[in-house]
């Protein structure tokens, strides 16, 4: 069961915030509103949203400063930020993206466009970003060094297969649909066909050699990564 995505709106103009909130609520999101940087920080300290909609022009700390700050903080660095801006010129957009925003939307925007952008940044949240070592049986993946070992012997794994394996290893023992894997591993590339997943799974199994059977095909449903393969 999916939880309702929580969206933090950081916007000093109540009319705009209200309009956004109404649209989000009608479309299955849970909006929260912060009128300034301080309120936004308090919200973030309390509960992390799935997406932050961040107005550029705020009293006190600007949206740009906030984006930079939240990107640098361990707690908030993975939360997608969508900048809301009246500034449409390219230099400003680049500044927003450089500050760590995932995307920006130029005011005035249509609610439909905003929703589409929010869904896109949600899809784009690729879990591969997190580092560290994941182990399962004899198989070990190090996300920092991009190495995969089987019983301490290094394996050759392509970049996409690596991302796929990393995701599967961090979400084992459950069935992943092809569409779900596309969302989580490939992110926002909606033009990729589901068949592509099969191709990469096949390659990944080959790369894993004798551990290839840890990726099971679940008929009619998708794939499962398991420490206890049935064949
Ligand atoms: Ca403003």
Image (spheres, rainbow, N blue to C red):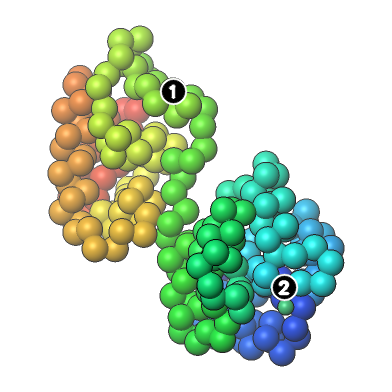
Q: Give the farthest residue toward the top.
A: 152
Residue 36 is tagged as none
Q: Please, is residue 160 above or below residue 79 in the view?
A: above
Residue shown at 39% from the left, 35% from the top = 166
> In the structure shown, which secondary structural element does the residue marked by tag 1 occupy?
loop
What is the C-alpha distance between the residues marked 1 and 2?
40 Å
Which of the image's four quarters has the C terminus?
top left
Q: Residues within 10 Å of mark 1 (few under 14, many from 20)?
A: few
Q: Residue at x 60, y 75 (%)?
A: 87
Rendered location of residue 25, percent (x, y): 59, 82
Relative side of 190 to 25, left or right? left
Query: Which residue in the structure is indicated by mark 1?
Result: 145
Q: Where residue 86 appears, x then y in whole percent?
A: 61, 79
* Residue 226 position within the rendered picture, expressed as x and y whole percent measured from the top left: 33, 33
* Of the pair 112 and 177, the residue shown nearer to us: 112
Q: Give the answer, above or below, for where 69 lies relative to 201.
A: below
Seen from the viewer's position, the closer of residues 70 and 211 is 70
Question: Is residue 210 at least partly visible in the picture?
Answer: yes
- Which mark's residue is nearer the viewer, 1 or 2? 2
Specify the label residue 57 is tagged with: 2
């Amino acid at each position: 069961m999916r939880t309702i995505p929580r969206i933090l709106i950081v916007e000093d103009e109540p009319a705009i915030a209200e309009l956004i909130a109404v649209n989000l609520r009608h479309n299955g999101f849970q909006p929260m509103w912060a009128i300034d940087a301080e309120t936004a920080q308090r919200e973030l300290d309390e509960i992390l949203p799935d997406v932050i909609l961040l107005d550029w022009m705020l009293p006190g700390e600007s949206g740009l400063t906030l984006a930079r700050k939240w990107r640098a903080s361990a707690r908030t660095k993975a939360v997608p930020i969508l900048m809301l801006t009246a500034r449409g010129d390219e230099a400003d957009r680049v500044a927003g993206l450089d500050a760590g925003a995932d995307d920006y939307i130029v005011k005035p925007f249509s609610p439909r466009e905003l929703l589409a952008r929010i869904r896109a940044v949600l899809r784009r949240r690729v879990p591969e970003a997190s580092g560290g070592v994941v182990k399962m049986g004899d198989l070990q993946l190090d996300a920092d060094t991009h190495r995969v070992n089987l019983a301490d012997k290094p394996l050759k794994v392509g970049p996409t297969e690596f991302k796929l394996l990393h995701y599967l290893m961090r979400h084992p023992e459950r069935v992943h649909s092809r569409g779900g894997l596309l969302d989580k591993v490939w992110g926002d590339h909606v033009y990729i066909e589901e068949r592509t997943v099969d191709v990469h799974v096949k390659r990944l199994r080959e790369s894993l050699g004798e551990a290839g059977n840890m990726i099971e095909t679940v008929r009619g449903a998708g794939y499962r990564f398991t420490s206890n393969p049935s064949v």
